[in-house]
Amino acid sequence: MTFKPAGYIRTTLPVDLSVLADLDSGRFHSIWLADHLVSLWPDSIWTEEFTDLVTVNPSPHRHLDGLAMAAAVAALTENTPIATSVVDTARRHPAMLAQTALTISHLSKGRFILGLGSGELENVVPYGIDFSRPVSRFEESLQVIRLLWESEGPVDFEGQFYTLHHARLDTEPYDGKVPPIWVGCSGPRMLNIAGRQADGWWPVGTLTVDGYAKQLAALHQSAERAGRDPGSITKAGFITCLIGDEGEIAEMIRQPLVKAFLLQVRGDFLAAQGFKHPMGDDWKGIHDIDPRVLTRERIVHCLDDVEPGAVLAALPHGTPRQIAGIAKAYVDAGMQAPKILDYGGMAGLAFGAKSAAKVREAEDHLIALVDGA
């Protein structure tokens, strides 16, 4: 199994492209770019009362277009594959996704990976975009994208969500190869689709190593039923964690934005770890985050009910060396391209200033562990 850590570049203001030289150095498997309109952090507590991050960033929602950023990264790098992680199929018509992916593939000389997902409520519903039947829409979007990529001449298509009449996409793939499609998902139906059609996979949501292994097994089973080699699917993943010594982590989990991470965690996951979710056992994590209804009063009430142990149960934590050991367990379970993401930076400016160095140290330890295995 091939292994390299993944790289990541922020798609929020302020833009920092100075990191691209390192990301393109050969150290990283691929460079990932998020695509959001709205962050998962509640703006009702993005105030000086709760965090000093507001002194350098007045809003957590200063997002740039992930595909446009990917095109810029493509033009400024030469070696490393570039992946959106992920673009949703609710906000963008599949014909436009197909054309844009081919465009970036040409700009990058074949290095672009189209990372797709079915969407999240906070990026769709506030803008009046239809979010009904997102998985069915996702599956049909994949069908349309591949149809446009693989057909010669005009295309006709009658689906539940999209209709094409004499539609053309005559731009040929770079070097005769269409961009790989990676899928971000965790639910049984989406894993089934990914196993049948995806070239790569990211799990979504909070996971244990055992939970990851079970989802990977479901992905492999779907691929085998479709007559595909499961080994042909690249396995990627974010390992969101808190990096620091015992005292630093104790301070981190007292900070409101770190405690608010539990909004991204499902109630049944916390229940399995022995904790009650402050938003209720039926809370569905990122799928329930709606910035229109998460008022300051509701968030503060939620944070007051957060047990420190619940945060530690949801976020792997430890020194860089300890985090490397945790990441190695995911690699041993099948993950080929892990991205260690230090959530401790959300604890405030002092922690954020040290975050990149901690991630680098954890990556170094992880590379040494894998190389020495």
Image: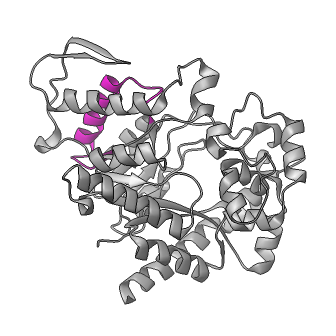
| Magenta residue span | 88-114
Q: Quadrant of residue 341?
A: bottom right
Q: Residue furthest top?
A: 165
Q: In which quarter of the image is residue 295?
A: top right
Q: Does the magenta stretch include residue 76?
A: no
Is 369 located above or below residue 111 in the figure?
A: below
- The residue nearer to you, when weighing 43 against 296, is 296
Answer left or right for 18 relative to 303.
Answer: left
Can see residue 38? Answer: yes
Residue for point 52% across, 70% down: 209
- The residue nearer to you, when weighing 326 against 361, is 326
Measured as percent of width and height from the top left, residue 114 is found at 34, 42
Residue for point 42% across, 68% down: 5
Counting every numbered tag in the picture gives 0
Residue for point 48% across, 63% down: 212
Q: Looking at the rendering, in which quadrant would you find the C terminus?
A: bottom left
- Colour mode of the rendering: one colour
Measured as percent of width and height from the top left, residue 193 is found at 35, 43
Can see residue 81? Answer: no
Q: Looking at the rendering, in which quadrant would you find the N terminus?
A: bottom left
Residue for point 55% across, 37% down: 36
Answer left or right for 10 relative to 350.
Answer: left
Measured as percent of width and height from the top left, residue 315 is found at 66, 65
Answer left or right for 365 relative to 271.
Answer: left
Is 48 located above or below residue 296 in the figure?
A: below
Measured as percent of width and height from the top left, residue 292 is found at 74, 27
Q: Residue furthest front?
A: 225
Q: Is residue 108 magenta?
A: yes
Q: Residue furthest bottom?
A: 372
Is 176 located above or below residue 236 in the figure?
A: above
